[in-house]
Image (tube, grey):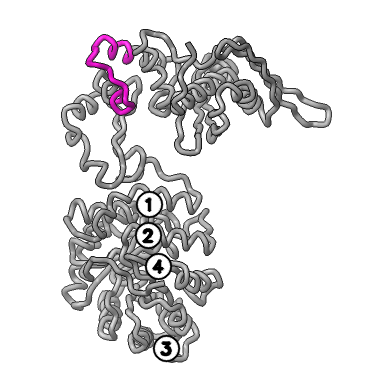
Amino acid sequence: MTETATSELDDSFHVFDTTLRDGAQREGINLTVADKLAIARHLDDFGVGFIEGGWPGANPRDTEFFARARQEIDFRHARLVAFGATRRAGAKAADDPQVKALLDSGADVITLVAKSHDRHVELALRTTLDENLEMVRDTVAHLREQGRRVFVDCEHFFDGYRANPEYAKAVVRAASEAGADVVILCDTNGGMLPAQVQAVVSTVLADTGARLGIHAQDDTGCAVANTLAAVDAGATHVQCTANGYGERVGNANLFPVVAALELKYGKKVLPEGRLREMTRISHAIAEVVNLTPSTHQPYVGVSAFAHKAGLHASAIKVDPDLYQHIDPELVGNTMRMLVSDMAGRASVELKGKELGIDLGGDRELVGRVVERVKERELKGYTYEAADASFELLLRTEVQGGKPLRYFEVESWRAIVEDRPDGTHANEATVKLWAKGERIVATAEGNGPVNALDRALRVGLEKIYPSLAKFDLVDYKVRILEGVHGTESTTRVLISTTDGTGEWSTVGVAENVIAASWQALEDAYTYGLLRAGVQPAE
């Protein structure tokens, strides 16, 4: 591993990622060493300046991570950072095993957490305010003597500043005068608001002269805003986590912070071309931690540039900038048009263009599609969540009402057998016509819908081999309003993949099996279309 990263950026502004430590504290995230290595590679690829890898010596996993990272990752942009605490009260940094573990990690940058709230010093560390200052000075100075670059996190700084501003500033001075490159003001409880952050950072900067950073938790929903407010006040180091992962409600989200710095502030904080990788990196890290990416996350969510209202679509047709604050391609995202009962002509025309279907300026055709969508959504269909079903509807109208057909359904049935021993058997039979051949296929499954899916696959795979790649990956059922509970309309959404892409289809009927069959039919039809298979005559 090369310890010195080769980023072309200067040292005037730092993007510091702490996903591997702070982000890992989110409920539901449990990272293995392999996970941490994978995330570190993604973050380095994105181009952050520093990656905090964890607390070596505090647990075997983090110790192993640093040992493996030295051997397995050739950092191109980022520097790996070890996290730890100042030495114990009454000891010497040179003799502290925890400080030694930081040095043994091999990281050339070390972040120390220091108490800056007087009550925490006295109640948590159980030492004096003067001894705490000496702990900061001694630990920073010792690490500097060992050739390490040192950052100091002033934990609970803003609460401490409110209680005892002179002491909080004394901790900043102690760290800076001992050789810390940056002193980070931490809103550990996440209770601050942007105007408060800006006022405190401005004052501390003026009174201490130290280089300052910001670490914001999101308990008020203001972590990103607080981070940018600190930058406005003069902070030149921002600490964030990918997708805002973190303890309680999370940390300042790396991606909107970086996008704002680059696109709104005009600061060059990433290597050239890396901002366009942001959406991909966000989703890749979500996959590693096994959390579904937030669809409505700013900049990188799939809905970040999705437009539904007809008024918006009409304006976007003239100029996308009228309803978008940036070009989505700048962050690796795309604009999407959602088709619903709120859609107008412009929505349908833009969606057709997005799908590669030329509507040829046919106002009558577009009008029919709009009315068809509104009519079907009144019955319970939803097309904003089922692009594949909408494309099939659109192609049907383009072809003069003739649906795209790869097979004709003669009949289908699903049987659920309740056995005396408490087990259940699910069996389905489908009767189809495809390419002039009558097909009867039966299959069992772990439920009636799964049995239907298997029977359909068994019946058609010999004629359409590409079906072997299809896999149903998500299945959602919603009961819509009806006269009586058991007579309500049911909507089913199915997501299918062929290994390279994913598509969603919708079915609506009075029972869940019939609705599921509709969605399955559309899923198979669209998948064959996507595979380039010619429809049956």
Identify the amino acid type marked 3: Ala
Task: Give the spatial CA distance, label 1 vs label 4.
Answer: 18 Å
Type of residue at label 1?
Answer: Ile
Residue 324 point in image, percent of width and height? 22, 38
Nearer mark to the viewer, of 2 and 4: 4
The crowding category of the residue bearing disc 3, from other C-alpha atoms within 10 Å (few below 14, some 14 to 19, many at least 20), is many
Mark 3: which secondary structure? Answer: helix
Q: Which residue is mark 1?
A: 281
Mark 3 or mark 2, whichever is nearer to me: 2
| Pointer 2 with pointer 1, Cβ within 8 A | yes
Distance from disc 3 to disc 2, alpha carbons, whole Å, reads 32 Å
Q: Which residue is mark 3?
A: 93
On the image, the x and y values in percent for residue 525 come to: 49, 21
71 or 305, nearer to the observer: 71
Closest to the camera, between mark 1 and mark 3, is 1
Residue 477's place in the image compared with 379, above or below, is below
Looking at the rendering, the stretch of residues picked out in magenta corresponds to 351-370
Alpha-carbon span between mark 4 and mark 3: 31 Å
Read off the residue under disc 2: 43
